[in-house]
Image: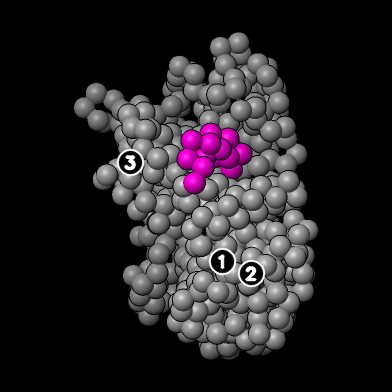
């Protein structure tokens, strides 16, 4: 069936939200077992393992001997065990995998049955199953997954030396496939909480450290007292490379201004690392504001990097003098580096190139944004003053880049909440009035049918409104969903009581990108869930004590609402009541 092949393709690419939505539609006109399996799998990966469990348990009762159904169900139980550390889910996962292994002799369900038996406190049964798994392996010397299975089975059998050797062989087979490496590391990280795991195996599969970067640009030609002159470029590049090597950072997040940003990206590239680039607005305006003033050779280096590596734009709209876009971009860059580090179970580092002599603070500049980094203990500061002699004349007002327009406030960054409303309290008027009085609400809200969109001047306003929605039985009905997003919004488009962008007759008025993204994501947000776009999710990730995020998908289209690619995260707001489902 072509539909199920499309679902399998989406899942193989990690597009779980899109797969879930397609599967929901498919199940309205088919009773296919495969469609049900793929729906449950994508539902679990979309941040709803409990709902996936409830759905697939009913399916498994009708297909008790089907290996695929029970294999997926065992994986869902295992995911719930990881999330909640409940022995009950470990036992359910063990029993499901055990039954499947007995019926199929499949090494994948066999090793999972062995591991979950050990984690559930039945080490003897775990050893018995581990030995049986070793007996059914066919080519563990050449096949990566069989090699890893053999290593894990030997670990469960407490054959430490043999297990260590097997993990080293598997690591060589993995090469530079970070997906495989992360998968094994996560399993080892789980296992080490229950039985001794060789340190060498953990080190071998440890993913690289993530590093975020912010730093000064090369001095503008009009700067009278040097801060980052072109003459020290080589020394700064060497210092950045040394910092990356010191912490074994091979995954980098940065913007691409002349000076520190480009040097960081080039250093990461030369070390064979992964380069993730971010721009706060249109490329042409960014070149004019942050690159071209330093000379053609910096423009050429910028262009080579953006042609080679993917670039994430906060918005592709013009700069128009909105300095807050720089600050938001840095916050997002910091947050995404933390989210990426979740797979390594180790916090990321911040590397900066920042003068201690120059204490000027510019909105969106390095000194203004470095305080957003949440862990000062994991910050490597490179001070260019070490390479620049103290100037003989006092420093004038610094000019870091030509600015075509003064800073403006008619297109601020807003923090959006979209939610489904109940008929009892269709607007949440009381809390909206409170937030407006506190000067947090940026514009009149817009609603259509049972959907409400509100824009807030600060993240606090959006979170307070979300808190109200999650804890007020009258505002959110049981079939509700909430979507969060952040992006620039032109307040000049507000007209009376209607501020949601509308296409005028003849298409004279273009849609607003931030709203289009918000509504596009809301289309994929499942009932009973909170989804956040990459930008908003990154901001929440900077406070891990209050929010738990898991990656769901990279949306590239939203059916009737075309949108540029945007990452989507499932959000558990740890300090709020969970939504009823």
Q: Is residue 148 visible?
A: no
* Residue at image coords 36%, 37%: 32
Q: x, y percentage for residue 412?
A: 53, 41
Q: Earlier in the sequence, mark 1 or mark 2?
A: 2
Q: Are marks 1 and 3 in contact (CB under 8 Å)?
A: no
Front label number (1 vs 2): 2
Crowding at mark 3 (Cα within 10 Å: few <14, some 14-19, many 20+): some
Confirm whether the magenta stretch covers residue 28: no
Along the viewing direction, whichever of 399 and 132 lies nearer the viewer: 132
Residue at which label 3 appears: 562
Q: Earlier in the sequence, mark 1 or mark 3?
A: 1
Determine whether 453 is above or below 63 in the image.
above
* Residue at image coords 60%, 22%: 478
Residue at which label 1 appears: 183
The magenta stretch is: 47-65
Crowding at mark 1 (Cα within 10 Å: few <14, some 14-19, many 20+): few
Secondary structure category for the residue under label 3: strand
Give the label on residue 130, or none: 2
Q: Main secondary structure of the magenta part?
A: helix
* Residue at image coords 71%, 26%: 471
Confirm whether the magenta stretch covers residue 60: yes
Along the viewing direction, whichever of 163 and 450 lies nearer the viewer: 163
* Residue at image coords 48%, 51%: 67
Secondary structure category for the residue under label 1: helix
């Amino acid at each position: 069936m072509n539909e199920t092949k499309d679902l399998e393709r989406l899942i193989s690419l990690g597009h779980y939200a899109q797969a879930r939505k397609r599967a929901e539609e498919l199940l309205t006109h088919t009773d296919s077992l495969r469609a049900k399996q793929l729906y449950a799998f994508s539902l679990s990966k979309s941040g709803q393992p409990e709902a996936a469990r409830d759905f697939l348990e009913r399916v498994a009762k009708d297909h008790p001997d089907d290996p695929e159904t029970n294999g997926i169900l065992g994986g869902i139980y295992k995911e719930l065990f990881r999330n909640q550390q409940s022995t009950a889910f470990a036992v359910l996962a063990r029993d499901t995998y055990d039954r499947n292994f007995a019926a199929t002799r499949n090494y994948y369900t066999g090793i999972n049955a062995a591991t979950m038996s050990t984690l559930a406190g039945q080490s003897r049964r775990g050893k018995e199953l581990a030995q049986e798994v070793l007996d059914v392996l066919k080519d563990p010397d050449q096949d990566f997954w069989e090699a890893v299975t053999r290593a894990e089975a030997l670990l469960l059998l407490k054959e430490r030396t043999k297990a260590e050797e097997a993990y080293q062989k598997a690591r060589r087979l993995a090469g530079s496939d970070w997906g495989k490496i992360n998968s094994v590391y996560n399993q080892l990280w789980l296992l080490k909480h229950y039985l001794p795991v060789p340190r060498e195996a953990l080190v071998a599969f440890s993913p690289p450290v993530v590093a975020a970067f912010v730093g000064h640009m090369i001095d503008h030609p009009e700067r009278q007292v040097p801060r980052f002159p072109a003459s020290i470029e080589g020394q700064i590049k060497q210092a950045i490379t040394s910092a990356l090597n010191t912490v074994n950072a091979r995954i980098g997040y940065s913007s691409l201004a002349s000076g520190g940003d480009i040097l960081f990206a080039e250093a990461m590239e030369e070390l064979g690392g992964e380069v993730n680039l971010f721009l706060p607005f249109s490329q042409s305006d960014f070149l004019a504001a942050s690159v071209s003033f330093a000379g053609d050779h910096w423009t050429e280096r910028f262009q080579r990097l953006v042609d080679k590596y993917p670039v994430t734009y906060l918005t592709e709209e013009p700069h128009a003098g909105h300095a807050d876009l720089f600050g938001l971009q840095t916050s997002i860059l910091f947050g995404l580096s933390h989210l990426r580090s979740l797979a390594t179970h180790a916090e990321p580092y911040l590397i900066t190139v920042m003068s201690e002599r120059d204490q000027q603070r510019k909105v969106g500049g390095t000194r203004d944004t470095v305080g957003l980094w949440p862990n000062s203990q994991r910050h490597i500061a490179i001070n260019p003053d070490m390479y620049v002699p103290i100037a003989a004349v006092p420093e004038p007002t610094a000019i870091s880049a030509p600015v075509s327009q003064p800073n403006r406030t008619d297109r601020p960054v807003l923090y959006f909440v979209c939610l489904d409303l109940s008929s009892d309290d269709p607007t949440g008027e009381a809390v909206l009035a409170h937030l407006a009085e506190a000067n947090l609400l940026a514009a009149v809200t817009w609603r259509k049918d049972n959907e409400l969109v509100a824009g807030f001047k600060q993240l606090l306003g959006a979170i307070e409104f979300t808190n109200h929605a999650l804890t007020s039985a009258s505002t959110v009905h049981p079939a509700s969903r909430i979507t969060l997003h952040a992006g620039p919004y032109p307040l000049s488009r507000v007209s009376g009581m209607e501020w949601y962008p509308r296409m005028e007759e003849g298409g004279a008025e273009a849609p607003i990108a931030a709203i289009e993204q918000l509504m596009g994501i809301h289309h994929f947000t499942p009932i009973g869930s909170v989804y956040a776009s990459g930008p908003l999710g990154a901001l929440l990730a900077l406070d891990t004590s209050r929010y738990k995020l898991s990656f769901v998908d990279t949306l590239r289209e939203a059916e009737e609402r075309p949108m540029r690619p945007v990452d989507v995260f499932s959000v558990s707001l740890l300090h709020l009541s969970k939504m009823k489902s």
